[in-house]
Image (tube, grey):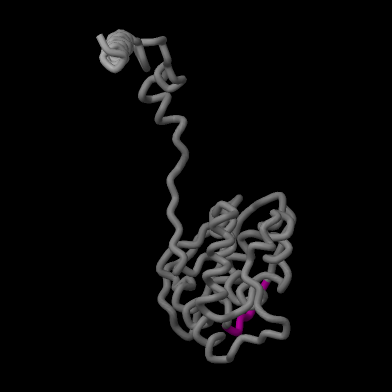
Amino acid sequence: MTDAEFIYNQTNRERAITRRSASHKKNGCRSKKCKLEVDKMSAKQIEEQHGPVKSWNMNTIYTWDEVLEMPDDIKVEYFNHLMTTYNVGLVEITKRQFKLSHGAVYGYATRHKFNNKLHKWPKGFKPRPEDVARYAEDIKKASFTGTEPIEVKSHTAAVESFTECETMEFSTSYTSSAIDYDGLKQIERLFSGKRIRVTVTIEAV
């Protein structure tokens, strides 16, 4: 037998041994028992672990309360989308859409450490009047029209359905240990942009 034949046979022998060893080797689930925590849970327990599923449309005019429900990364995407879509700054968005003081949203972003991810306009930037008008018009279209009841926290308020017209009225009466400022803010949004007459009566009971 020549050296070449010997090496050839030896190589084939080693390959045959490797092949037989591989075919008898235990891998994956046969090698050891491996269970996940979820395998111990019933279908009901698994369902209880699931949180609510929410979706957000970047083209929707949301209120500030609705924006607060967004995760921070979605807030960043939403604010940047508004700024680039309408060519306005964050201050314009804050006061027109959210009805807050001019630095409120940026202050919130700073506290939550995502202010550096917001779109930055060049220094001295001012939105064009036509862009502001387009933005204001979309906000107006998305605003409350009176076809849905207003929800006032901490007390039950009677709200009459009405359609948009020259005269709009709202009245409510409740007994509480404190003034419901959240309710007042919602009423303010309801009459935003209109001249109003306000009568306040508080009586200790």
Name the quadrant containing residue 145: bottom left
Q: Relative to 53, is 55 above or below?
A: below
Q: Relative to 101, is 179 above or below?
A: above
Magenta-colored stretch includes residue 158:
no
Name the quadrant containing residue 91: bottom right
Name the quadrant containing residue 93: bottom right
Magenta stretch mostly in which secondary structure? loop
In the rendering, at what x and y percent does residue 128 appear?
59, 90
The residue sitting at 53% across, 80% down in the picture is 86
Decide if residue 31 is on the left or right side of residue 169.
left
190 or 67: nearer the viewer: 67
In the rendering, at what x and y percent does residue 137 appear?
48, 83
* Residue 19 shows in this picture: no
Q: Relative to 158, is 34 above or below?
A: above
Point out the stretch of residues depicted in magenta: 194-199
Magenta-colored stretch includes residue 196:
yes
Quadrant assignment for the N terminus: top left
61 or 106: nearer the viewer: 106
The residue sitting at 67% across, 65% down in the picture is 105
In the rendering, at what x and y percent does residue 199 appear?
66, 74
* Residue 203 shows in this picture: yes
163 or 92: nearer the viewer: 92
